[in-house]
Structures are given as C-alpha cells and as structure tokens.
Image: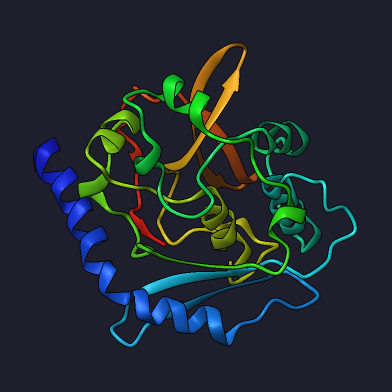
Amino acid sequence: MTKEEALASLAKVQKEAESLKEFIAAQEKQNAAGSSLIARRFTTNDAKTGVYLSIPSSVPNPSMPIMGYLIREFMDRGGKVYDAENRIKRWSAMRFVVRGGLCDAWKGGAAKTFCTLAKQPTVGDLLGQSFVWLVDTSGDIETHAGESFDDLMEAGVDVLNPMAFVALFLTAPDIADPATYTSFKGWRWEWVAGLLEIDDEVFAAGGYSRSVGLSAGWGAPGSSYSDGRARPVVR
C-alpha cells in the first residue's frame, strides 16, 4: 500500500465514524460526572469501539494540568509509568485541542501551530465534564504505520487526543499489568495529537507501552517511524 492509499484509508475510517455522533451524545447524557474519575471502553450497536472519560465534580488540586492529573490518576490506580515525574512534567506543558481535532488548528507546521494553541487546561477547568472518543483498537494496523506526524496533519487525519490516549490505559483489563495496556502486539510508537516545546524546539507527542509501563513521549514531527502507527479518532 502506498503512502497516499494509507492516508486515504485513515481518512475513510474517520468519515465513517461521523454517523455515530448521536450515539456519542446519548453516552454523555447517560453518564453524569460524579465524585471520582470514570474511564471505560464501550462498544456501539454497530460494533465500533469507544472510550468514555468523565472528570469528577471536585478534586483536591484543581490547578493541576489535566494531563498530569490523568497520568497520576493512572498511577494511583496501580498503573506503571516509565520515567514518571519527567514525563508528567513534559506532558503537563503539552498544548492540544481539548474538544475537536488538532487538524482544525494546524497552521502548516508544528512550531507555527504550537504558538497558536492555548495553554493546557487544568483539571479545575474541566470539572464535571465528560468526553467520548471513537477509536480504532483492533490491534496491529499495518496499513496505518510509518507516516510522520506532519504527513497526518497535512492529510487532515486527526489522531488520538492525549486525554483519550491515557483513558485507554486507564481502561486496561489489569491496570497493574503492562501486558494488558494495549490491544496491539509488541512495541509500537503511536502518534498523539499534542505538541510540546523542549529547549526551543517543538515536538509531536507520542507514546507506547512495554514492560516498564506507559511511556508518554515525544518525537520529531517530520520523522517517519517504520514501527510507528496512528489511530484516527472522532470526538
């Protein structure tokens, strides 16, 4: 499969899922936020997979950036995170679009886009809110592998929201066992729809899981990793 065919395949999956917006709205209505974080996977009537995330109505530290809050919640529930404090620090400074896709804000390059994005919201900004994403969790997706982050953005293919990425880890069958964290086999770099600035250089967010647990990382947006992948997402 050529690069153009692979990108077209990603865009097709995203377009097909648009028909499920009514189902998403129903899920949000049925699941009001409570006193604790709720994260779960679900399957729609037509066998699509989604992840639901509900932010509690109150938290002890509302000034914590939302990504730092979600990763720490994962750890508090027994999840393993590689190089935890450093990764939490970096991902807490990430910029991304909370609702909607990063493609909508794309300005033709990671550095230009980073400057136009608002700072990451705190968990206090999102108290009581719920989110639903439809994602591809079908295992290794060879036809989606190897594209750079820049290629995906230019093609209009939105990849996993950072919150959705961590939510998938929160819904692992056994949160204490890294072997259950992902539905694909082996090491696989995965692009995430967020941007980070480190030493005056802008990187695209990404991650993977291994025996060390969740790795919340970053990579050069123009790099094409042969063992990388992208999962399209519809809000």
Please state which of residues 69 and 28 is positioned toward the viewer in this rendering. Answer: 28
Q: Which residue extends farthest top?
A: 200
Q: Is residue 146 visible?
A: no
Camera-nearest residue between 165 and 109: 109
Q: Position of residue 190 (x, y in %)?
A: 43, 43
Quadrant location of the C terminus in the rendered image: bottom left
In this orientation, which residue lies closer to the viewer: 212 or 18? 18
Horizontal placement of 176 versus 64: left or right?
A: left
Numbered marks: total: 0
**Residue 24 placement, left or right of 94:** left
Image vertical order of residue 34 relative to residue 197, above or below: below
Q: Is residue 112 above or below residue 34?
A: above
Q: Residue at x 71, y 35 (%)?
A: 83
Pinpoint residue 110: horizontal percent, then vertical percent: 42, 24
Q: Quadrant of residue 105?
A: top left
Give whichever of 43, 227 is nearer the camera: 43
Res 5 visible: yes
Q: Is residue 102 above or below residue 217?
A: below
Residue 12: image x %, image y %?
17, 58
| Above or below: residue 74 compared with residue 214 | below
Displayed quadrant of residue 17: bottom left
Q: Position of residue 161 (x, y in %)?
A: 48, 50
**What is the image's colouring?**
rainbow
Query: Which residue is located at x 46 percent, y 84 percent?
Result: 26
Residue appearing at x 38%, y 48% in the figure: 159
In the picture, the quarter occupied by the N terminus is: top left
